[in-house]
Image (tube, rainbow, N blue to C red):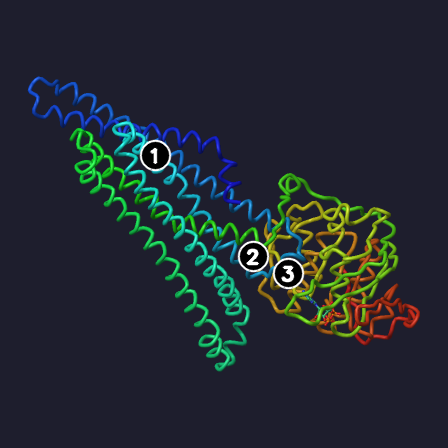
Amino acid sequence: MLYRLVLSHKKLLILATLLSVVSALSGIGIISLVNAEIENVSNPDSDVLRGLGIFFAALAGFLTFSVISQYILTKLSVQIMVSIRENLVKRVLSTSYEQIERVGGHRIFATLTKDIESLTATLSAVPHVAYNLATVLLCFAYMAYQSWQLFLFVGGVLLLAMVVAQLLMGLGIQRFQAVRELDDSLFKNFRALIDGGKELNINFNRKRFFYKEVVTPNIQEIKKSTISAHIVFIILSNWTNLILFLALGSVVFMSQLFLSGIATAVVVSFVLTLVYVIGPLTVLINTYSVVAEGIVSSQKIEKLQLSEEILTDQLDNTLNPEHNWQTLDIEAIEYEYRRDDSDDYHFSIGPVSTQIQRGEIVFLIGGNGCGKSTFAKVLCGLYTPTQGRIRLDGRDAAQAMDWYRCHFSTIFSDFYLFEQVIDANGMLADDNKIRQYLSKLKLDQKVTVDKGILSTTELSQGQKKRLGLLLSYMEDTPLYIFDEWAADQDPYFRNFFYRELLPELKSLGKTVFVISHDEHYFSLSDRILKFEAGQMEDVTASFPATPPVDKHQPVALA
Ligand SMILES: Nc1ncnc2c1ncn2[C@@H]1O[C@H](COP(=O)(O)OP(=O)(O)OP(=O)(O)O)[C@@H](O)[C@H]1O
């Protein structure tokens, strides 16, 4: 991923690197000028003013090209950072719900925070790496030009440094990988800290246990692993510094011992260039650990198996469902939760076959854990059937999954309430219409709306579900799935749901799947599908369609 991102900005990168080379050349020009002028110090005939003029021209060139190249490279690193963020969000949006559920929300969250941060730091270092690498390489080229024999010697010493550095880098990456795995557990614990706030607050012993036995060991382990990873890079950095000083001293001593014919000016020039190169080399070495963390993050992102196929173009258009569909064929569908090696138990449903007509109210019933919600998730396309297929008016859902899914509006038990109310065209919905439904659902005293944005979603569980219903209404899809919607409602709204809402949706030609344990209302449905241990049976005939007498008055629809 790192590589792909850098490549996608290659034009700007090449331009900035070329400018870096020019700026580094100016730096070397200054050194060679100073070097030449050292020889003129004791020469009374030298043209000092000319030398000074060239010196200032080189300084101006150095400053101009350095500033321009670093400006372009910094701009580039910001662009790359924006690309990483957009790319990851699009990849998560393009990934199936099934895969996200399998990977675990905490891992995705860790990637969206931790890995984005590491990758951004790594890619922000690219400009500095390009600039300093260009300087280092040009300095080496300059040294080789001055004396290839002396350069061969310095090159040999630096090669030794690089081999050791490579080994240390591999070890450092391994240790950062271990830290990154521990970060996933930390994010899981952070999630428990927030989501389990009630339980932790009420039970002191659980709070103590969570802190002492769960979070603290996790944090301590991360501390140990992080230090052990950084030690590698500290050794690496000091090793390279040592080698540089070794090269510096060796140039002086080796030239005396083995290259006695070499001019003092060449040795001085080597020393000056090596001293100059220490700065850029130190910057390069210091970015090692940042680059290592970026590599680990990049590998981690690949492991999540997020979708590669990004919805770039599709996100510019809205999808329109077929409101006048007639039949939904469910043909021998089966679904099996992917086996976890550590888990002996796994659940599967099916084969399930049935045909649903437009405008039917279908109840999905059965005991806890028998597969109703699993079936509903397959039905609306959140899960891909492991066998069988679903056809809407003959069109295979698997061939146009996004289009198929947009026919459904769902409220599952772990639903999320967005503050933005979206209409059938995917635009912010009309305030007057929203207010009408807020009043109908008796939420107008609690929630207001302004330009399609709700004032709050902080409500009681039952109220939240009513607000969820409002969002579903406004989406105006042809099919609805309500997973035990009425379970949290008082008798008034439960009655409203079964006796007013469902008939109203039916009269509009909507098809509604209702997961319910409210036996009292089963007879209000057109079809009843009963689940038992993942198997489905049509039991409509067992529930005669005679509405029971209810003591609660139906709610008057606005
Ligand atoms: N994400 C998952 N991964 C693995 N197994 C799961 C997952 N979600 C549910 N299951 C298993 O599938 C089985 C059926 O769950 P499902 O939620 O479909 O039941 P249900 O009929 O809707 O139950 P309830 O009435 O309690 O809501 C359960 O035994 C559960 O352990």
Give the alpha-carbon distance from disc 3 to disc 2, as whole Å.
11 Å
Which picture quadrant has residue 283? Answer: top left
Instruction: Give how far across and how far down residue 95 sits, in percent.
Output: 64, 51
Q: Secondary structure at mark 3?
A: helix
Residue at x 40% of width, y 31% of height? 16
Q: Secondary structure at mark 2?
A: helix
Q: Is residue 503 left or right of residue 446?
A: right
Q: Is residue 426 left or right of residue 363?
A: left
Q: Is residue 207 left or right of residue 381?
A: left
**Amino acid type, label 1:** Leu
Q: Secondary structure at mark 1?
A: helix
Instruction: Give how far across and how far down residue 437 sits, in percent.
Output: 70, 58
Question: Is residue 495 visible from the viewing direction of this image?
Answer: no
Which residue is under mark 2?
108
Instruction: Give how far across and how far down residue 308 sits, in percent.
Output: 62, 46
Mark 2 Cα-neighbour bin, 10 Å: few <14, some 14–19, many ≥20: many
Give the alpha-carbon distance from disc 2 to disc 1, as whole Å.
40 Å
Question: Is residue 246 visible from the viewing direction of this image?
Answer: yes
Which residue is under mark 3?
102
Residue at x 44% of width, y 31% of height? 14
Which residue is under mark 1?
137
Comes first in the chain, label 3 or label 2: 3
